Image (tube, grey):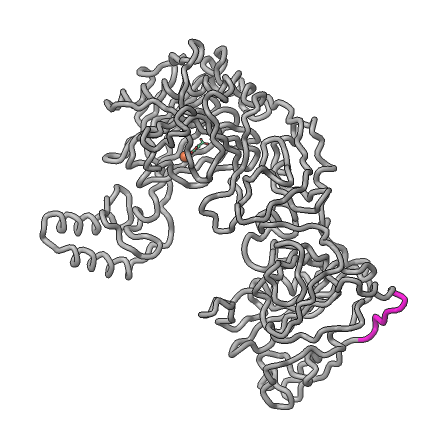
Amino acid sequence: MSAKRKRATAEAEVPLTPTVDGEPPAWANFRSELGDTLPWFRAVQGGIYHKDGLAWGVLISRDSGERSYIDEEVVITRIGGSCSRNANGDLVHVKDQEKNDLMVKCLLNSMEQKVPVGIIIGEHNTVLGKRVPHPYNVMDYFRITNIWFECSGKRRAAKVRYEKLDLQSKSWWADKGSLPPPSPEERDFTSRPTSAECNACSHKSFQVFHEGWMCLQPSCTRFFKIEGLVAPANLTYHQKFLSYRMAPDLVMKPHHSLIPDLLSTLDENDASVATSRVAWKGIVCPQCRKCISRKFWKGWKCSDDGTSIATQPQHLCTFEKMTRMPIMSLRSVIDTLEIAPQKRAFIPDDRFMIPEVDDNSLAPYRRLVYIIPRVGHITHLVSNRDINDHPNGPNTMFTQLQLADLGLQRFPLSNAVVPGTLTAHFAVNYGNPYKYVAPVNCKGFDEAPGVVLHALGRLQWATEKTVHLAGHKSYPPNEILVLGYFADMKIGYHDDGETSLGPTIATLSLGSRSIMQIRMKSKYYKGQSSRNTLLENDPVLPGCAFQLQRQTWKTEFERGMITQSKYDQCRNEFFKSHRTQCEAKPCIKLQIHHGDMVVMHGESLQRYYEHEVVPENKLRFALTARHIKAEHVDPKDTHKGDFTLAGNQLYNGI
Ligand SMILES: O=C(O)CCC(=O)C(=O)O
Ligand SMILES: [Fe+2]
């Protein structure tokens, strides 16, 4: 342990000794990578990861609060929650923290139940006073030794003292070249901070600060006072409070591995794990200790061909682990294969729209049509065993897609709340480039394996037939997006409403069954955006909130009976007193089986509605074909959309 200890001081006074002694046992560039990899820190936001009423992991970042403290073995921070940002962007307490506040309770539970917590330190922390090597750095496991309340401004705020569990090895964040820690034999495990009983409330408190003893019972009149006087602003921790150590305790065992060695448990010949949930967790790079999310269909790559966010420094580690990916049988992803009825009955559910059922027009497909008046329609083409068994049909395609080297990857979400969050599905685009919920890598059709062109043939057929049956002109697809889903992956609510797209979107589903739900977008449902901005041109869709009232004003406005400002005033006043918190409930629900196709048609459908798809089992592919308008294709990419389907790639509906 270094002989020289720093007192906790105000942020500006912390001397910046530049280097730490070692390297963290794991690190990450993004929070999402920590959450993907470390079972004890799955929190995507906030400073504490809690689950089942216990705290498991803590992140020390920019906001660890006043009088935070770190030395080689002790960490003192505030407990997040009850805070909001002031004008300077600092987190300040806006209400008194209580013992019953969720975070405080979870930490108290972990302390009482002897659950150690893992601590991570971020590069923007203001307390260590040394540069840490990476944006996020795993420190070690710590036990919680004290939780108490202090005054923070005018508020009562909870603080926590953590003590490193392993007192035998030197901490990597110690000063470079500092002495190793004393051996257990050299340590005094009996010393404790001084404590005393309060004359006013009889509550016993330990002495935290050098400046004097205080009652730490928040309800007491002498709370946080030194000899009856308000405590000074520049408090420093008492040496005894910092230096005491708990004796090693055999019961105090971390519940998770600090750094799980997931790879050692994954047998790549085992088809039952190849696409299971655990297969798309992150791993810790055995070479450089970086937490690596699974971005690639076949495995993990430590530095990843520039698909990471551009602001990150280039990472040069060469480690990669690509797996064999055994071929999954349909049997293993469709529980009812062969034993399901040959022909699926349509089971109406009155919570959702009932479609028109047509067994003739596109036989042997059953055609279920959901019409949203003035908006568009969704056609569900229900496949059957004969169609699926057909040569080059869905059964064969399911295997071929697994054999083909498609180049499927997960990409960072464009509008992620937490930067670096990857999509919960793999994607690759063929043909004209298309950006959906994330920028994807776009390959030309000349690079597409045969199975992708077979799918394109089917989707071309489905697009043409369904759109013509509706009496509209169809635009042939010139792009196909392949999505691949492992167990528990999905695509959350989104629309396919890019201005560059034609009005029709057709998807072929292969493998696991999935549920597709369609709902009205929030702003059209509520009549205003999340920032309470009124819709300029409210379509007043059937089933929207306050439909009758909104329609009345809209009609009056359109007929010139009220002015624009009166129309806006009516709506503003009404929405202020009638807040709708919840989102629109899904109005259409489809059970999509292996071999089914779904065609969404209508530009307004994508403008006003959004869809999500949640597969139910451990492997599914969705191939979605769209028409990208020529004027939206960069001239250097036009060749990518060129294709000619071979005779056997054209589809005739059987
Ligand atoms: O997985 C699916 O069926 C839907 C895919 C989808 O919505 C899309 O590609 O935009
Ligand atoms: Fe979509």
Residue 141: horizontal and vertical position, in percent?
Answer: 72, 57
- Indicate yes or no whether the magenta region holds residue 96: no
| Figure quadrant of the C terminus | top left
- The percent position of residue 623, horizontal first and vertical second, equals 45, 26
Magenta region: 184-191
The correct choice, above or below, for 523 with respect to 221 in the image is: above
From the viewer's perspective, is 309 left or right of 188?
left
Q: Nearer the viewer, residue 85 or 344?
A: 85
The residue that appears at 58% across and 51% down in the rendered structure is 31
Q: Quadrant of the N terminus?
A: bottom right
| SS majority, magenta | loop
Is residue 188 on the magenta stretch? Answer: yes
Ligand 2 occupies quarter: top left
Look at 61% across and 42% down and name the residue there: 293
Instruction: State the image coordinates of residue 616 (x, y, percent, origin top left).
Output: 52, 33
Residue at coordinates 37% horizontally, 31% vertically from top-left?
Answer: 633
Q: Residue 391 at x, y = what percent?
A: 50, 10
Left or right side of 502 for 338: right
489 left or right of 70? left
Closer to the camera, 98 or 269? 269
